[in-house]
Image: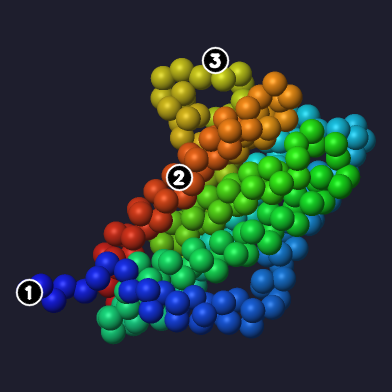
Amino acid sequence: MSNAAPFMNWFQGNVLSDRYLETILADWKGTGLLLLQAPLLAGLAVMVWGNLGRATSSLYFVMTLSMLWVGCMDGCREIVKERSLFLREKMAGLNLAAYLYSKVRVLGLLACVQAFTYSIIIYNYVDTRVAVGWIVIAMMATTFCGVCLGLLISAVVKRSDYAVGLVPLVIIPQILFSEFAIAEDDFQGVSEVLYTLMPSRWGYESLLEFADSGGSQLTAAGYLIPLMLFAAVFIVIAYPILNAQKY
């Protein structure tokens, strides 16, 4: 009979989640700054599009990019900042799947709060042409995808300042390879592939579809599926990277 340990240790996952949540709450200054990002970005968007009083396609792109940024900033330092502790606990039998689960679980909760705050502020001051419930769902999916991308960055780098420095390098391509830069039909070859692989594309197109009076809500919700797939891929890639690291 095999005595191999299970891939996922749920007991460890719950304990690690509780410990991580306590750490997040104890660092009220750092957590407060993270929570402050969403209302500040929403306020800036309202200052601009409040002049029009209604949403435009550019607002939808800004909303998507803002929440991707927020999520990425949430996760980009959360592994690397405790690298030494992680490696010591790994030597002592830490279940890697449980460790990643704890990060995703707690940061996912933080992302939900940020996305909800951002969505409510935008909805209350700009005619978004999208029901508030759908905005919240789209922003939550986008922010969560950003969190997982941030965790991947945090798994790759060896210093927190490197992680923060990499965030603009993954966000700027979201602008370059988007309809915000050139029309979709103008992307060809490698650029077309990269355009398809940009998470921002799917959150943006989802909001566009929700806003289209002739569009299908089911189709719009379907655009959020790639965001969840990207999030899963980022965590799957982070797993072997962390597994290979030694103390």
Residue 130: x percent and y percent?
A: 75, 36
Q: Is residue 112 above or below residue 182?
A: below
Q: Is residue 55 left or right of residue 216?
A: right
Q: Which mark is residue 1?
A: 1
The nearer-to-camera label among 3 and 2 is 2
The quarter of the displayed image where residue 209 is located: top right
Marks 3 & 1, CB-CB < 8 Å contact:
no
> Where is mark 3, residue-wise?
185
Disc 3/disc 2 C-alpha distance (Å): 23 Å
Residue 165: x percent and y percent?
A: 55, 55
Residue plotted at (68% across, 54% down): 115
- Image height check: is 60 above or below 192? below
Amino acid carrying mark 2 in the image? Phe
Q: Amino acid at mark 3?
A: Asp
Within 10 angstroms of label 2, few (less than 14), some, or many (20 or more) residues?
A: some
Identify which amino acid the numbered label 1 is placed on.
Met
